[in-house]
Amino acid sequence: MTSLDAEKPLATAVPARRAYLDNLNPEQRQAVETVDGPLLVLAGAGTGKTRVLTTRIAHLLLSGHAVPGQILAVTFTNKASREMKERIGALIGRAVEGLWVGTFHSVCAQILRRHAELLGLKSSFTILDMDDQIRLLKQVIVAANLDEKRWPARVLSNLIQRWKDRGLTPDKVSASDASEFANGKGPGLYATYQERLKAVNAVDFGDLILHCLTLFTKHEDVLQDWQRRFRYLLVDEYQDSNVAQYLWLRLLARKNRNLCVVGDDDQSIYGWRGAEVGNILRFEKDFPGARVIRLERNYRSTHHILEAASDLIAKNAGRLGKRLWTDLAEGEKLRLCGVWDGEEEARVVGEEIETLHRASHALNEIAVLVRAGFQTREFEERLVTLGVPYRIVGSLRFYERQEIRDAIAYLRVLVHPGDDLAFERIVNTPKRGLGEATLQAVHRLARAEGLSLTDAAARLVTTDELKPRARSALAALLEHFTRWRSLLDHASHADLTAQMLDESGYTEMWQKDKSPDAPGRLENLKELVAALEEFDSLVGFLEHVSLIMENEAISGNGSDMVNLMTLHSAKGLEFDTVFLPGWEEGVFPHQRTLDEEGNEGLEEERRLAYVGLTRARKRVYLSFAANRRIYNQWQSNIPSRFLDELPPEHVEVNTETGLYGGAYGGAPGLRESKTAFHWDAADGYRPAHTLEGKGRVVEVDAAAFAAGARVFHQKFGYGLVLNAEGDRLYVSFDKAGRKKVLASFVTGA
């Protein structure tokens, strides 16, 4: 290891007056000049945290506190690392050699390569990608005589990654954690996997930090060497750190204690992938004597936006507390609109985007941020209809997603049996035991006889050319398609599509997949089935999809496009105008998060809402729908509790015709029943119910339905009231199960 003594400080070139500090506000300057001891910089959205980090590093160098090799700055993305280096170079006036600036994983990889032999590896070790990890885990599972279909490698991979994120080696996995896979065999498989990795001189991404922890805890001399090397540690986005990263940082900072972490507890939204908000909440306890500096002056958003966001996030108990303020103009109030259903919501948003664009608003500065990926479909189709170019950020467009392409391939074969490309895509999806030899035989016959692949397969299954198992599987698939085609003229094409996806085993394939994205793929499939009901025929739908894909290819050539993404993907971005649709209970906050994580999940959902609001510089549009089709079923919705938590003086509510203006559409089962929500400064949104055919409005109070009362709901049928909270009822429906509904949506039974 090279000595640091040879490195020369940069302070000799510094003038007496430090001009690089001139553009900082008092709190930012305080954070830059507080160089010794543990420091927590609570940096709210848009408060200039990157400026603080880069200026702090420049200050350490230019003031002579450190030479480049004594500073370690850790980020979460390679992009952030590059930007940090560039900004430090601009402040100092030249590129600085020797700085350690990188992601947790890249820094740990460099350390491991210097000490690989101490861990039984060679310095040339390979870092496996996900495909290689899955392949190796499959071998481990098969060697243990386990059924890989019942205990998928991808599930084990996710579980091992969770353990590594928590700093757990195989011997430290608890019995309760072990029970999650193969009846407690998970830790043993984990240990075998680690042995296999070492045997082929490889690590996975989780190992980079875990091995560093092992290195530092088992080799005190190595730890002390790196502690002497890094006199100053800086960490960006500390609220997103996991347990293993926290433990690693704590070891490195133990000697000098010059650890500066910058983060925002109010923007911790990645708990689902291992981030531990407790790391930032416990900082003062973990590092006694730590100083806390709050950056609350926002340079991004207007007064109304910041006040609304601050009041919302104040409802969280698990936070250190700060309140954003700005010198910018008061700006426009947040605009809130209630609509009848998701289709109308997309129409309203699309029209508003057109209006903004006609007023010379750049499309690049407009974002539509949704809670779940399935919500993008209606907005994509509306923007295509309007001819407004758009991009999907951080994800694929709806019709480009794997599961949607697969489902459409099934529909193409159903409608056009001669579509060879579609047939080839789905013939062994899901796996039907049709190997390469079978597919080659089908292709050979098709070429020789000038047949489509479907016709060639139909001919082959009547011969002994194929092995019995393959012949049986291929024949079964062809019989399915014959039967499905016989239903084309009789069954609803939406119902037929759902039936086809179920009977083909495609839906079951994703139901059994335990990867984190599997639930989203199932949601997308249900959204696809719902979309089919808007078309008179499957042929019309397939033509529509072709036109959309063509329009997407054309729009992709331009640069000025509306940004469409999930709230999670929007972290770190900012736009002049932000649309936040789908603010309904069950959608946002997301019901699955509430069910699985309870109050902690609710607080993370509220932080996600806060992130959404603070992406906007000038204007925010909020919307919710009275009815939304989710999982291919219509359901009545109540506005998100987050809307009740917004301060009314900063929100402008569309009350021209109640909140549900315009066409009510023909949501199945709702007929002429219409609901409007009215704003009350004290109580938030209160529902009013228009009785069918009566032409009058009456207020319905939840108190009229006490626990134990029998009620009737137009969609969910008969049920028993379990509890009543304000205008919300918790009802156990005879067929639909437990639901939360508005009192105005039910009648006594």
Image (spheres, rainbow, N blue to C red):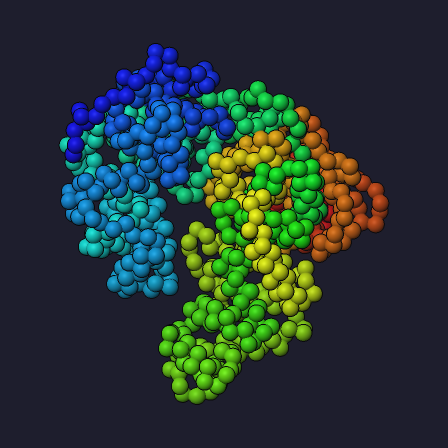
- Between 709 and 484, the residue placed more toward the observer is 484
Image: 29 above or below 81? above
Residue 482 appears in the picture as rendered = yes
Instruction: Examine the image and state in which quarter residue 612 appears.
Output: top right
Instruction: Examine the image and state in which quarter residue 470 appears.
Output: bottom left
State how many labels appear: 0
Image: 734 above or below 689? below
* 703 left or right of 317 in image: right
- Between 719 and 446, the residue placed more toward the observer is 446
The picture places residue 491, in percent across and down from the top left corner, at 66, 70
The residue lying at 46 percent from left, 38 percent from top is 269
The picture places residue 633, in percent across and down from the top left corner, at 62, 56
The picture places residue 80, in percent across and down from the top left corner, at 40, 36
Image: 700 above or below 310? below
- Between 701 and 505, the residue placed more toward the observer is 505
Residue 195 appears in the picture as rendered = no
Image: 429 above or below 583? below
The picture places residue 533, in percent across and down from the top left corner, at 66, 61
- Between 490 and 537, the residue placed more toward the observer is 537
The residue lying at 64 percent from left, 68 percent from top is 539
The single residue placed furthest to the bottom in the displayed view is 463
Q: Quadrant of the N terminus?
A: top left
* 73 left or right of 738 in image: left
The residue lying at 36 percent from left, 25 percent from top is 93
The residue lying at 45 percent from left, 30 percent from top is 265
